[in-house]
């Protein structure tokens, strides 16, 4: 298991390997949303919902729990990714992935085997053609593998209001941004943040 491909990965772990911290936090936000634990607030921000986190049959991942704890006020995705507690959760998430041979030391970029595994998963689980009949795990996996395309299909209104889908202004009209990579930019698989950062606040995504 030198390349780690026999490891069963959770959607947020797949997102981290495929497109980096922002993608992993996006999946965590999606997980919380499906549980009723977060809602879109003012444009580009997310706030905690009113559902009881302990009522779920399966607890959210430690990363999702860190994101939820950060939402003391409406917060944008960019601020969430930079929050020290969220960054700590991401760092702890990387440890077993590195031990499984999916991340390289010392920079913790994805290994060749990890990148191949994510590509294989994208082929095995193509973007759904409809949101009907999907389990929550199916939805999270789709977002982990296909990023903004899956968000536009599965939760377009929430994703747009929460700032999970980026906008551009063209000719005075607001359009969704289409660019390289599932999350609207070049692959973030080699962009790993470490250390402290700005705390939670109302920053936009």
Image (tube, helix red, strand yellow):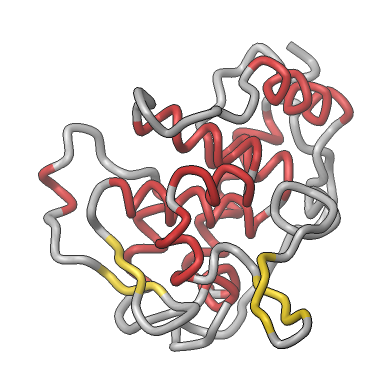
Up/down of 46 relative to 185, above or below: below
Return the x and y of residue 8 as percentages of the image width and height.
Answer: 55, 19
Q: Work out whether residue 125 or residue 88 is closer to the camera in this orientation and state it.
A: 125
Up/down of 179 relative to 173, above or below: above
- What residue lies at 57% left-to-right and 42% top-to-bottom? 150
Return the x and y of residue 32 as percentages of the image width and height.
Answer: 33, 52
Q: In terms of image quadrants, where is residue 173?
A: bottom right
- What residue lies at 75% left-to-right and 18% top-to-bottom? 120
Q: Quadrant of the N terminus?
A: top right
- How many dots with numbers? 0
Q: Work out whether residue 200 or residue 140 is closer to the camera in this orientation and state it.
A: 140
Please state if 139 lies on the left or on the right of 38 as rendered: right
Q: Work out whether residue 137 or residue 151 is closer to the camera in this orientation and state it.
A: 151
Please state if 180 lies on the left or on the right of 88 as rendered: right
- What residue lies at 53% left-to-right and 49% top-to-bottom? 151
Return the x and y of residue 192 as percentages of the image width and height.
Answer: 75, 58
Please state if 55 lies on the left or on the right of 113 as rendered: left
- What residue lies at 77% left-to-right and 37% top-to-bottom? 103
Q: In terms of image quadrants, where is residue 204?
A: bottom right
Up/down of 179 relative to 39, above or below: above
Return the x and y of residue 128 as percentages of the image width and height.
Answer: 55, 28
Q: Quadrant of the C terminus?
A: bottom right
């Amino acid at each position: 298991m030198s390349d780690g491909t026999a490891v069963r990965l959770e959607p947020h772990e797949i997102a981290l390997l495929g497109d980096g911290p922002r993608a992993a936090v996006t999946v965590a936000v999606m997980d919380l949303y499906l549980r009723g634990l977060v809602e879109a607030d003012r444009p580009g921000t997310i706030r905690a919902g009113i559902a009881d986190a302990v009522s779920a049959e399966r607890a959210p991942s430690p990363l999702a729990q860190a994101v939820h704890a950060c939402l003391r006020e409406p917060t944008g995705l960019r601020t969430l990714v930079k929050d020290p507690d969220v960054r700590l959760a991401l760092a702890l998430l990387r440890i077993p992935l590195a031990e499984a041979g999916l991340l390289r030391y010392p920079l913790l970029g994805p290994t060749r085997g990890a990148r191949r595994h994510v590509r294989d998963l994208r082929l095995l689980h193509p973007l759904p053609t409809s949101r009907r009949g999907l389990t929550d795990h199916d939805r999270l996996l789709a977002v982990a593998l296909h990023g903004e395309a899956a968000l536009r299909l599965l939760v377009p209104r929430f994703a747009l209001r929460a700032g999970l889908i980026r906008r551009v202004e063209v000719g005075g009209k607001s359009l969704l941004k289409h660019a390289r990579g599932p999350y609207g930019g070049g692959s973030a698989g080699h962009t790993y943040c470490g250390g402290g950062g700005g705390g939670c606040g109302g920053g936009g995504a």
